[in-house]
Amino acid sequence: MNAALPTSAKASVAFQHRHAAHCESGAISTLVSHAGLPLSEAMAFGLSGALAFAYLPFVKLQGLPLIAYRMPPRAIIRGLAKPLGLKLSFETFRRPEAGQARLDQLLDAGEVVGLQTSVFWLSYFPEDMRFHFNGHNLLVIGREGDDYLISDPVFETPQRCSRADLARARFAKGLLAPKGLLYRVLGVERDGVDPQAVLAAIRRTARAMLAPVPIVGVRAIGLLAKRIAALDPQAPASAAFVGHVVRMQEEIGTGGAGFRFLYAAFLQEAAELCDKPLLAEFSARLLTIGDHWRVFALRAARMLKGREVFDPAALAVLLREQAEREAAFFRDLRGAL
């Protein structure tokens, strides 16, 4: 449904809902734009240095290891503070009643408020899209009666959510429990994006992806390939492990390929902003890398559905090739700046 879009008394522009590729980069880029500094989602993602890869076998999700294709939740929001001169406010609450009262107070004052929530309790999500993930970001832009007006970046239009359901989503338990987190932009010191800050962010991402540790960056992709190569094709747990890898890649957040595509859009924008046409060539190269992540996911899905013989060793080969592509990409990108 379409909800009325209020204009905050503190904002310099009327609120504009924006559909985004990823919730956190979408929410914060909209919030910063609403505060008066136009910012694309791709620029928010790249400028915060959010692109990553991590294989963390000691952090478990339902007994399976955490595999991430971006920096941890809140890294995009916090990562924009320095390059944009953002003054941010974060608040968490022990009691849901206090969290809801504070949200109401801010909305009544005309503020647009960012929230971290669970996906599962947001009643406007179709049932087949709900799952227990506590790192979802959205903006609350007003309230009417017992409903909140929501600008959720993953939806094309604003939504409504009941007071009870939003409270459950804000205070869900478990990994990444949001604890009622709400955040706001209190001020923006810059009047535009500094090209030097963009180049510094690119160097930082390249350095992180080439880090000499086994669980982050391109080495972590190789480590995951090694783990998959060692799977017994006949063991049911092996298929569950590969299914988990694909789910983390394609269903959680924007996915492995999606984040590469988003970073490619950032490089395209950076090429013009920094007057460095070479970055546009890297953008095109990263799009191809994203396509290869999709090829890996498709091949794995076909095996899991029985359309191909389940062959972990073949999937490991694809992952090793992906690690080599990304290693070469980030070495070349670092060398070009």
Image (spheres, helix red, strand yellow):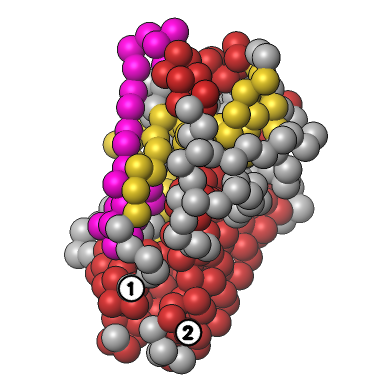
Coordinates of residue 102 in the picture (x, y in percent): 42, 19
Q: Nearer the viewer, residue 4 or 301?
A: 4
Q: Earlier in the sequence, mark 2 or mark 1?
A: 1
For the point 71% across and 53% down, which residue is it?
302
Reply above or below: 292 against 255: below
Marks 2 and 1 in Cβ contact (< 8 Å): no
Q: Is residue 96 magenta?
A: yes
Q: Is residue 177 magenta?
A: no
Secondary structure, mark 2, is: helix
Q: Amino acid at mark 2?
A: Glu
Quadrant of the snapshot with the C terminus: bottom left
Specify whether residue 181 is in view: yes
Quadrant of the snapshot with the N terminus: top right
Q: Nearer the viewer, mark 2 or mark 1?
A: 1
Instruction: Provide the residue designation for mark 1.
Output: 194
Q: Amino acid at mark 1?
A: Asp
Reply above or below: 154 against 286: above
Does residue 155 appear left or right of residue 32 in this picture?
right
Give the extent of the magenta segment: 74-99
Q: Which mark is residue 272?
A: 2
For the point 39% across and 27% down, which residue is it?
181
